[in-house]
Image (tube, rainbow, N blue to C red):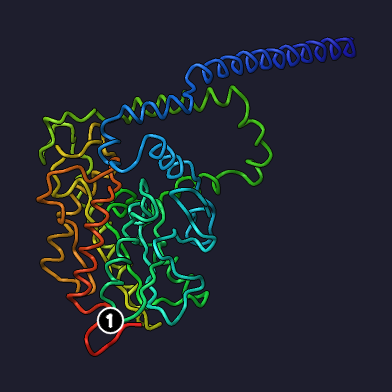
Amino acid sequence: MAHRKFLDYYRNTALFILNLVVLLVIVNAALYVMFRVNDARTHVSEAERIARIHNNPELRRVYPDLDAQSIHQLMQETWSRAYGYEPFTQFRERPFTGRFVNVSEAGYRLSKNQGPWPPDPENYNVFVFGGSTTFGYGLPDSQTVASYLQDYLAAHASADVRIYNFGRGSYVSEQERVLFEELLLSGLVPDLALFIDGLNEFAFPAGPAETERLKALFGAPASTLDRWRWIQRLPMTRLARYMRRSATAALTSGPRIDRRNLEPTAAFDDGKYRDPEVIARVIERYFQNKDLIGAVADSRGVSAVFVWQPIPLYKYDLNYHLFARSDFGSNFFARYGYAYVARRIAQDPPGRSFLWCADIQESLKEPLYVDKVHYTARMSRLFAATIAEQMLERGLIPVHTAHTPRG
């Protein structure tokens, strides 16, 4: 009797499991077909994308020298590149070769008249650090801040200036400090290290951009990701991810910006990015990193210069911003944080190696950004010229004079 009950239990359990597996297979097959149909329906062909660019007057205005095909290629090369892993800094720009965007194996983006690698000690070598605005997202190699800076400095310096653009998307000052130290440890010592910061310090107030993903990775049980990696490819998993994203977007989405509300106390701003404790913590973190970088630079005989960059949310008329139609997200911290920084440096000037460039766009009535936060070529050139002028005025680079022949 017990044997028969066990067989009945086993049979029913096996049948239930079989039906469950069949159901899961059917559901996944149905979802697979649905996603394939939806992907095909929403797929935009190359020709259609180019046509949209051609008919987008805003993009054509910020890229006046490029045709639709070239704009499309530039955007592809800018945004299709995934980060690569790097010890200590978490992530880096991957090596890349394109028509407009080129990143070396050593990790720097190419500039005009790019110097050799390793740097020639006979040259005046400048390592530039910063985020995506420094890297030059949305711009060709020849139109980045670093490229224009090389032009300006080369025209005045008493040595052969060579710029190395180590700007990387989403980088904050901690990562720049670590990257600078790693280069020094590798025996790569520049004459001058230039750090361009501001926006990302506030955009990522909790630390480097990938911190939360890494915390989730290390919070998972050992080998969980490897053991269940195949689950990530199931259509049901894709549906779950879609539902989670939709729910998160519904809970966190901000209102769309009305251009009539672009004054400093805009109605769409609910005040959540004005937290003085967060702003104070970000500012203190930056200046501590600045001091640490300066100390390390001094120990290796490197001149360190720190630049506070311009952003669209500080002293710029957003009525001329072609892409300010939706929420700027955590970048709004910078809208208020910049005013705190301005007051701090007015009360306690950080020295001649700190260049305040945040308000260089205040009187300009024209589009200066190719998207929400990245510079146009015009803005990139203006920013580079401002940096160069301040460095020359303050004697931060060796200057060509009648008594110091170049070359």
Identify residue type, mark 1. Pro
User: Based on the displayed image, in which of its 4 quarters is residue 54 positioned?
Assistant: top left
Query: Secondary structure beneath disc 1?
Result: loop
Position of residue 73 relative to residue 249, above or below, is below
Tell me the quarter of the image containing the N terminus: top right
Position of residue 327 relative to residue 81, above or below, is above
**In this picture, residue 141 sits left or right of residue 40:** left
From this viewpoint, is residue 175 visible? Answer: no
Q: Residue reaching furthest bottom?
A: 403
Position of residue 317 relative to residue 404, above or below, is above
Residue 6 screen position, x and y as percent: 85, 14
Q: Closest to the observer: 308 or 368?
A: 368
The residue depicted at 41 percent of the width and 76 percent of the height is: 190
Which residue is label 1 attached to? Answer: 398
From this viewpoint, is residue 209 visible? Answer: yes
The residue depicted at 57 percent of the width and 43 percent of the height is: 220
Residue 129 screen position, x and y as percent: 37, 63
Residue 28 screen position, x and y as percent: 63, 18
Residue 293 screen position, x and y as percent: 35, 72
